[in-house]
Amino acid sequence: MKPRAKQPLPDFSQIPADGLKIEGMETSSGIKGLGSIEFARNRFDPYLVLFEDHLVMNVMRLKEKPYSEIERMILLPRRKPYALRLYFKHDHRTFSTTILNRELLQQIYDFLLVKNK
């Protein structure tokens, strides 16, 4: 079996007007305070789209949130699959995405840290 060629990382310094789509292994949504308990999971078409002022998440349906609404982020980079969980102000739901590329996950996390300030 041939090893897969590594995909180039996207350029986070220039976000296109139609957004930067990040496809993952799965996306999920849970309820704040219940830890890792999920109430929705998407393995069919999981993605996150980053824009200059907001992000769009696809779990059960598309959900749009401004970066200023991010209350807390948890980065889980220790073992595959890597994950990022987002908590939002004034929302009882969480959003998580799992990605196989650790560097990409770290870039997304760093991008969100800057945008959330």
Image (cartoon, rainbow, N blue to C red):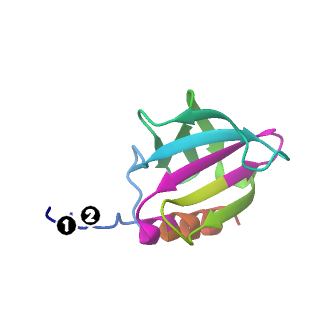
Question: Left of 108 or right of it: where is 114?
Answer: right
Q: Name the residue under label 1.
A: 3
Q: What secondary structure is marked by label 1?
A: loop
Magenta stretch holds residue 87: yes
Q: Nearer the viewer, residue 32 or 114?
A: 32
The answer to whether 41 is drawn above or below residue 97 in the figure is: above
Q: Which residue is drawn at 46% across and 40% down?
A: 46
Q: Quadrant of residue 113?
A: bottom right
Note whether 58 is above or below 6 in the view shown.
Answer: above
- The location of residue 12, given as percent across then percent down, is 43, 65
Q: Residue at x 57, y 66 (%)?
A: 109
Q: Which of marks 2 and 1 is in front?
A: 1
Q: Is residue 62 above or below residue 55?
A: above
Q: Nearer the viewer, residue 30 or 47?
A: 30
Q: Residue furthest front?
A: 1
| Mark 2 to mark 1 CA distance (whole Å) | 12 Å
Quarter of the image with the N terminus in it: bottom left
Q: What residue type is labelled 1?
A: Pro
Farthest residue to the left: give it.
2
Look at mark 2 in the image and give the residue it sits on. Answer: 7
Report helix, strand or loop for mark 2: loop
Q: Tell me which amino acid carries mark 2.
A: Gln
Q: Give the range drawn in magenta.
A: 86-105
Number of residues whose C-alpha sits closer than 10 Å to that of mark 2, classed few (under 14), some (14–19) or many (20 or more): few
- Report which quarter residue 68 is drawn in: bottom right
Q: Would you say 102 lies left or right of 1 here?
A: right
The magenta stretch spans residue 13: no
Which image quarter holds the C terminus?
bottom right
Looking at the image, residue 117 sits to the left or right of residue 11; the answer is right
Q: Residues within 10 Å of mark 1 (few under 14, many from 20)?
A: few
Q: Position of residue 17 (x, y in %)?
A: 40, 47
